[in-house]
Amino acid sequence: MTRYRIGVDVGGTFTDFLLMNEEGDAQVYKVLSTPADPSIAVIHGLSVMAEKRNADLGRFLGQVEIIVHGTTVTTNAVLTGNVAKTGLLTTRGFRDALQMRRGIREELYNNRYLPPRPIVPRYLRIPVEERIDFSGKEIRPLSVQDLEDGAAKFKENGVEAVAICFMHSYADGSHEEAAAERLRRLMPDAYLSVSSRVLPQVRFYNRVSTTVLNSAVGPILEKYIRSLTAKLEMHDFKGLLLIMQSNGGVTSPEVVTELASSTLLSGPAAAPVAGIAYTRLHGYGDFITVDMGGTSFDAALIKDSTPLVTTDGKVNRFALALPMMDVHTIGAGGGSIAWIDDSGLLRMGPKSAGARPGPVCYGLGGTEPTCSDANLLLGYLNADHFAGGKMTLDRPMAEKAILEKVAQPLGMPLPEAAYGMCHIMNINMASAIREISVQRGYDPREFLLVCAGGAGPIHAAMIASELEIPRILVPKESSIFCAAGMLLSDLKHDFGRTYHTIFSGKDMDVARFLSLIDDLQREGDRILALESIPVERRMFQYSLDLRYVRQYHEVNVPVTMEDLRTFNGESMKEAFHRQHDRLYGYSLREEGTEVELVNLRLTAIGVTDKPALKEEEYRGKNPNSCLKGTRPVFIPSQRDFGVVPVYDGDRMGFGHELQGPAIIEQTNTTIFVPPEYEVACDAYGSYLLRLV
Amino acid sequence: MNRNIDPILASVLQRRFKSITEEMGLTLLRTTRSPILNEARDFVTGLYDRKGRMLEQTEYIPILAFAIQPVCKHIIEYFGDDIHPGDVILHNDVFTGGNQNADVAVFKPIFHEDALVAWAACKGHQADIGGAVAGGYNPEAREVWQEALRITPVKIAEAGKLRKDVWDLIFANIRYDIVEEDIKAEMGGCVVGERGIKALLEKHGVEKFQSHVEYLFDATEKMVRNEIRNVPDGIYHGESTVFYDGIHLESRMKINLNVIVEGDEITFDFSGSSPQTEGFVNAPYTATASAVLLTFLMLINPDIPHNDGITRPIHIINPEGSFLNARFPAATTFGNSIAGPNSDAIFRAMAQALPEKVTAGWNRFLGFTITGTDPRKNRPYVDILFLALKGGSGGTWEADGYDHIGLINCAGGILAQDYEMFELHDPHFLEKHEYLVDSAGAGNWRGGLGVETEFVIHGNNVTGIAFGDGVDEEARAFGFSGGKKGALNGAELRYPDGVVRTVKSKEIIRDIPAGTVFRQTAGGGGGYGHPFERPIEKVVEDVRNELVSVEKAREDYGVIIDPVSLTVDFEETERRRGAKS
């Protein structure tokens, strides 16, 4: 009997599925999302797969070993304000840190720009008498009376979730623990988050904001997972359900409900993982993944097969300081709307027509010209072969919209206006890539561009030209890249501790440092054991947050277990100097400037079995059997249309080579190959584009 | 439209200019040492054409909106044809275009095929700039030399080689070594800018570059002129007062402003404002111009690109010798801080023409800088207490003021310190940092809230420097159209022996003993519209959240709320609110 693994990625418009058998055969499914209860679409998609196999859902699910699930329920809850009613217990004197957000107004000149509504209103942010100082010393004991008054107020107001965050609890969490224990007795049904467990690291605002976010989405995620597992169990699913997190790893439902905020911003987190699997086959470790859908464009940079990680996340303008994939998202997609600003310049997005009404050419009532409309006029999209021919695009309508709203106001001919729209999109996406490369100290020209998403591969080569990137990889499952990444992810958990001291200086307490390392390791082991990961499949990656004395921003430096255990301070400092030099173009090695330690970090990994990608049979170099015809397509370098061969991507395979200009059409995506590029199809059905 | 202009290329250039200035900014954020730069973000990055006209600029705080262009033009004039590839020029002097002594700028000319095409520049507030007092704020200064080392345009690198002699001379006159590092970071930012512009020049050529830049300037100018044309023609008068020159407690300096709107041109005429003062409460011309520009930008479409086109329809009449354009060798460090009173005068004037665009008064900040020694590390420390000084902004049509935003010069661009980092960096024990109850001026749209801050100083050899305003009754943030005033600023030191010392708005306090408690309140913004028109549920929400007291709800808002149950006495409320009309 065939065994299956399924990756499920819930998006705003579509829920994507990638079904894989033991041989590595992969199939793509897409169903419309059901935002009110996303698990309905999940079950619906699974039923479609079962039907295709003439099996009932129960029998089919009996064959499924693993379902990896990426969900946006928590993110949507915060964005729409539909979070759990949450209360906060915090140190007296500091109850406004959450709402103040350190006093930032993101739009300097806009006096009507309002702050986001605080996730916990002030009257539910309860001050508690207690105080621990920066060294972990108790200054004032914890007031039990304040806790009881707080709990009473919470109950009176129907609070469902509570966050506890006290000053300097990263240095000593005993007050928080005592408060948690008391609260659990007073409010046994409330979802509870404790800052010294969620994020035991220095920086009060980041910690309080992250802990509050965790509580506010905890009950939402708990409920959703309960509903999903109940449905799966009802249909006899006996396999393993894993949930995608924003750190690029997966975890069990039990663990994720404790740290619900780890699913915030998890949407694009699987792309780097998928990228690693696809690029490794070609021996690349340095690459940039981009994913362009209908409304947004995500970009991430991966160096030495290691994705960049950030602790600078924001959800609805509130800090989320958990380690997560450093993915940069901008509002750019097929649905991005063209408009002319007051000074007469053409702009694209960030407003999007979304899926409904969608671009004008969808014929669903859209009237604003979009990127997809331009792509249709330029010949990149095929009016008769959209979504594998399931949908016909309305070219005259798209022409009319672009003529009236772009070409005429700018006094330009229609094709140039359409190309202008496409070009501005490319510029916007290229600058998003600059942000995650040039601004992080990397030269994009040295990276492979991995281009995914339904709309991405049309623009891939044009974006690459803008950045002078010579090589592009378009994966076979481009349109459901994230779902593929989920199947390839390991279990992954991040832990941290703050120890603020001159690193390797005379006052540093090495024994304390080592005991913190032991703490971290114990925590990692505990969680992985909970997830039934055997010892030989556990991996521990340590890193330190270091900086030069008097600097304000730390640099995260990976360190080896050996350097840690033997405390080889010099070797670890050297790693810091090198990292600093690469990021910012200088180090202070020669000056002998002291280095400060801020945090110790551990990533605990449970290595999963990954499905092998299936190698195709070699089909020879000549792709002529896949030639479908020709059509006029706009060639940017010639600033004019040219007649270009069109290939059926669904029939192309290993070995096929061709020289641009060409169009390759697949069911869910289209690849535009400009004349300057040649394409080779690899053993896994992916396309490698190379600048000639 | 000109046949040789490609509107798409113009969009592309504008987008690239913006992203290059942001890349330059990120370089500074990541590489500078001083928290004034990387936490408070008191700097600006920009690109200018060969004539010194602004191509694009990213100011991280608004007061720097006009801080580079006048200097760039001066430098071009000063060096004439003696500008060569690889030169780097340093400048801070307020009498040759600078805005504030401590704001030091680095300029790098950008060449293409041996011709000067553009400039990259970074300017940031340095931790020290010499002068009599560490940190650059000297309320006791009477002339510029007591404030700072004057750096008129000087080449610190020539043809790609650092001039060690000049470099050493400059830094021999500056206290902290981090300033050297931070100037290097500014040089790094300019290199990033140069690289970006060169790539554009290689791709498009100089001719196309220049013609499209002109097109961009014209397009922006057109946009601004349209905005001005929508303002009814007229002469609008506004006034404002600055309190205390740092010498005579009763001194008052008056800003006298006429805004003249004529078709698509606007003139800000400051004639008749008070003469320059003996002390440091004076502004260089550029600081006043920046204050005008930042307030003007708040009155128009916030998306207009920041390039030369924006300034073309704006004229400023600001006679020399007034405290808004002080004559050499006046002390001027307080100049940027006059932006608040300047904005007040502009909003008051424009209220007559654009009542829905102006805001009520913003809290005028009171700054307090502490220097001393940290006994834990036996190292000197300096801190500008950003967290304590950030008050509220004024309410406006359909929007409450912004809470804890801080001075209008920065408009929410500066970060307050994180509490735990504050205690790790400074030998201070923080007791409280919360919104200040009843600090917001009441109104249909209330002012933003101020904050109260209290901490114990455990440092040694501690000196405090106060510079600011907003402690005098008349200096409260004003209400607009029936709105009430915001709360005042105030600061005091409670010495271990029980003596309480009220801090003046401008003074140096030496020998503050360890164990002293510092307490400061930053006031709120003014309210907009009559508070009786504020929806009752919004008043109740503020009372429930303990941001407005029950008494204030009754007195100012006319809403009668039971202090225990928080229920509203609608009958009594209606009676009280009705009594107004």
Image (cartoon, rainbow, N blue to C red):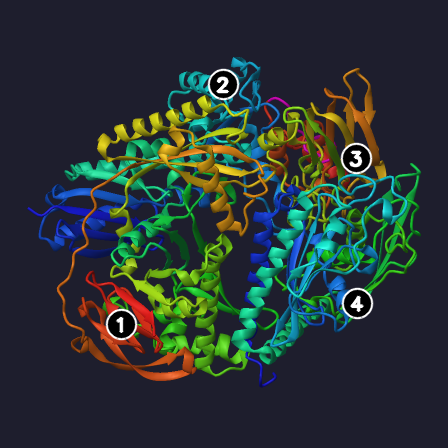
Residue B78 image label: 4
User: Marks 3/1: CA distance?
Assistant: 69 Å
Residue B368 image label: none
Image coordinates for residue A544, horizontal then vertical, percent: 45, 36
Q: Magenta segment range?
A: B554-564
Image coordinates for residue A607, horizontal then vertical, percent: 25, 39
Residue B465 image label: 3
Q: What residue would you read off at disc 2?
A: A175
**Is residue A253 found left or right of B287 in the rendered image?**
left
Inspect the image, locate mark 1, and give the three-letter code of the amino acid beneath it: Ile
User: Marks 3/4: CA distance?
Assistant: 36 Å
Image coordinates for residue A197, horizontal then vertical, percent: 42, 27
The residue located at (24%, 37%) in the rendering is A229
Main structural element of the magenta stretch: helix, strand or loop?
A: loop
Q: What residue would you read off at disc 1?
A: A664
Which comes before the other along the chain, label 2 or label 1? 2
The residue located at (43%, 78%) in the rendering is A400
- In the image, B140 versus A564, the foreground residue is A564
SS at mark 4 in the image: helix
Subunit of label 3: B
Are callouts 3 and 4 both on one chain? yes
